[in-house]
Amino acid sequence: MVNEMLVREGYAQVSTFPPDVKYQQRFLEAQRQEREANRGLWGACQAWLPTVSTRPVGQATTMPAQAGGCPQGCTTPPKGCVIKGNISSSGERIFHLPGGGSYNATVISPSAGERWFCTVQEALNNGWRKARN
């Protein structure tokens, strides 16, 4: 299977979409092995790696891509965690990536509930959406 080969060589992350879960455990095991060996994308810039689900579909527990990650969002970003989680005036949770149109103008106010994230998946897991600009 091409998708398994991509995971086994560290070029892809496992994504499972019910009802297509037949090979989920097989792919997760291949991903775990590549991640532990720091091959492919797992050996690349760790701050940008997505969060990887370690449980079967339907269970929400995740582990951060790096030891200093922000699984629930951080009020002070660990080194390399540069995703800004901003709350709009209407209360919408929006995250900004470096290079985005509003990234430099976005100021994070932890007291207002705004957060820093290390990965896009962390932000998504916490109910934030990607900025449109």
Image (cartoon, grey):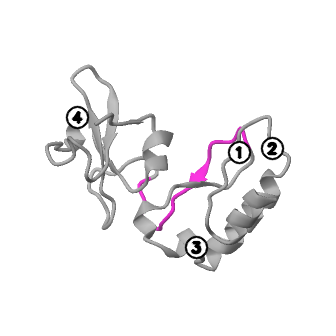
Q: Amino acid at mark 2?
A: Val
Q: Secondary structure at mark 2?
A: loop
* Percent position of residue 90, x then y: 26, 19
Could you tell me how far apart the alpha carbons at marks 4 and 2 are, in whole angstroms? Answer: 39 Å
Nearer-N-terminus badge (1/2) = 1
Give the CA separation, mark 4 to mark 1. Answer: 34 Å
Tell me residue 94's x, y (percent): 33, 35
What amino acid type should be assigned to the residue bearing mark 4?
Answer: Ala
Residue topped by disc 2? 21
Q: Which residues are magenta?
A: 57-70
Q: In percent of the image, x 20 and y 44: which residue is there? A: 108
State the residue lying farthest toward the top: 90
The chief SS type of the magenta part is: loop
Marks 1 and 3 in Cβ contact (< 8 Å):
no
Answer above or below: position of 15 versus 82.
above
Q: Residues within 10 Å of mark 3 (few under 14, many from 20)?
A: some
Q: What is the distance, in whole Å, between disc 1 and disc 3 at their CAs?
A: 20 Å
The picture places residue 4, in percent across and down from the top left corner, at 76, 61
Residue at image point 80% right, 34% down: 19
The magenta stretch spans residue 19: no
> Does the stretch in magenta take in 62?
yes
Contact flag, marks 1 and 2 (Cβ < 8 Å): yes
Q: Please name the residue shown 68% across and 72% down the image.
A: 9
Look at mark 4 in the image and give the residue it sits on: 112
Label at residue 40: 3
Query: Which of the image's four quarters has the N terminus?
Result: bottom right
Q: Quadrant of residue 60?
A: top right
Instruction: Kindly identify which residue carries mark 1.
Output: 16
* Distance from the alpha carbon under mark 1 to that under mark 2: 6 Å
